[in-house]
Image (cartoon, rainbow, N blue to C red):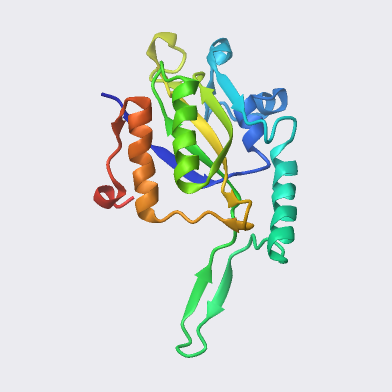
Amino acid sequence: MAKTSDNIRPCNIGQSEAHNRRTPQYLAHINKRNIYLRPDLMAANEAWVSPRIEGVSLGEYYKYIGEMVKAKTGRAMQTKDRKRVNKKTGKVTVVRGSTPIKEGVVVIKEDTTMEQLRHFCEVCKERWGITPLQIFIHRDEGHYEMPGDKTTWKPNYHAHIVWDWMDHDTGKSCKLLPQDMSQMQTILAEALDMERGTSKELTGR
């Protein structure tokens, strides 16, 4: 059985949509030595956009989140890491800046459906309060084991899930512990009918 995983990082607001939507500008400037896209397979890609963000760019939505945080908390959203010094011990700790929009790259199968991914997202929303904004299934990426020989094409089936990681009732970020992130991987495997990737506790990655 194929293995799946979900690698979640802060979303690159400036580049995410261009890559995920395969905009003409993006396609014209990608470095084809580093990434293979097959235009003949792009029709197999799929996209879902939440009504919450339909017709709105990620950049515009990011600004909206900042305004929401300001209204709810009375403070500007802290997006940069900052240092905090314990006055008693002198110990310095780093307080991570807020990353209100995150993006996960999910390993999928050729026949993975949008319905399966949306079900995974709904379970995560109910459990942790994180809200899916966009889902993109990419079936046009991969690589040639032998460049120029189309018979050696190896597809890289995956999906991008863009998340709103904020609690809009409090204006604060949703806090997921390492065990929550681990549980998310298990939920994903069950939703996609795939095998769970090896736990971080075992790989150390």
Q: How many marks?
A: 0
In the picture, measured across the screen, residue 61 lies left or right of residue 170, that is right
Write the residue at 38% across / 21% down: 109
Q: Quadrant of the N terminus?
A: top left
> Is residue 4 visible to the viewer in this orientation of the structure?
no
| Residue 59, quarter of the rendered image | top right
Write the residue at 38% across / 13% down: 152
Residue 87 position, x and y percent, is 52, 88
Residue 97 position, x and y percent, is 59, 61
Write the residue at 65% across / 38% down: 15
| Residue 67, quarter of the rendered image | bottom right
* Relative height, residue 43 to residue 57 (above, below): above
In the picture, measured across the screen, residue 22 lies left or right of residue 195, that is right
Residue 75 position, x and y percent, is 71, 66
Write the residue at 72% across / 36% down: 57
> Is residue 36 visible to the viewer in this orientation of the structure?
yes
Q: Nearer the viewer, residue 56 or 42?
A: 56
* Relative height, residue 187 to residue 68 (above, below): above
In the image as oriented, which residue stretches furthest toward the bottom? Answer: 88
In the picture, measured across the screen, residue 128 lies left or right of residue 178, that is right
Residue 28 position, x and y percent, is 69, 24
| Residue 80, quarter of the rendered image | bottom right
